[in-house]
Amino acid sequence: MHRSRFRLLTLRAVVISGALASYPSASPLQTERVVNMTAERFSFTPSEVRLKAGEAIEIRLRSEDTDHGFRILGTDLDVRIPKRGQGTASVKFRPEREGRYTFECSHVCGAGHGFMRGTIVVSK
């Protein structure tokens, strides 16, 4: 009786693993890196992010003062960052080519607004 129970459990394990193998799943290599970024007084911290071409990234944005924007030039990514205490904004970005991608505040936030920029540096 012990052998028949072992065979039944083995058979169930094979059937279950075969069934699971047929379902699509996300590859662990496709996970995205998260960068927490703050916007305050005409700067982003960090102001430079480095990643590899094809690497997915999620940038979680929080303001330490007033409303700001976050736009990556040359893309259609543009979000509003709510003022301090009003929540966060998030963008997902996966650059396929190496190069430098400039991001900036896209919501006029004061006299130093034009200086509120940063760079995403993408390498091979």
Image (tube, rainbow, N blue to C red):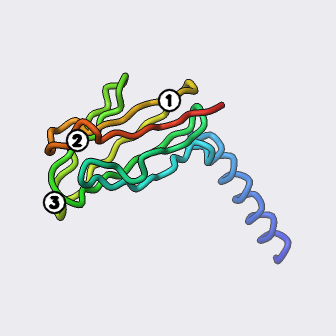
Residue identified by numbered label 3:
86
- Counting residues from the N terminus, which is met first, the one under dot 2 or under dot 1? 2
Relative horizontal placement of residue 121, taking residue 3 as reference (left or right): left
Q: Position of residue 41 (x, y in %)?
A: 24, 53
Quarter of image, res 103: top left
Q: Position of residue 7 (x, y in %)?
A: 81, 64
- Closer to us: mark 2 or mark 3? 2
Residue identified by numbered label 2:
69
Relative horizontal placement of residue 96, taking residue 13 as reference (left or right): left
As displayed, is residue 107 above or below residue 46? above
As displayed, is residue 111 above or below residue 45? above
Give the position of the C terminus as an image quadrant. top right
Quarter of image, res 119: top left
Give the position of the N terminus as an image quadrant. bottom right
Residue identified by numbered label 1:
100
- Counting residues from the N terminus, which is met first, the one under dot 3 or under dot 1? 3
- Counting residues from the N terminus, which is met first, the one under dot 2 or under dot 3? 2
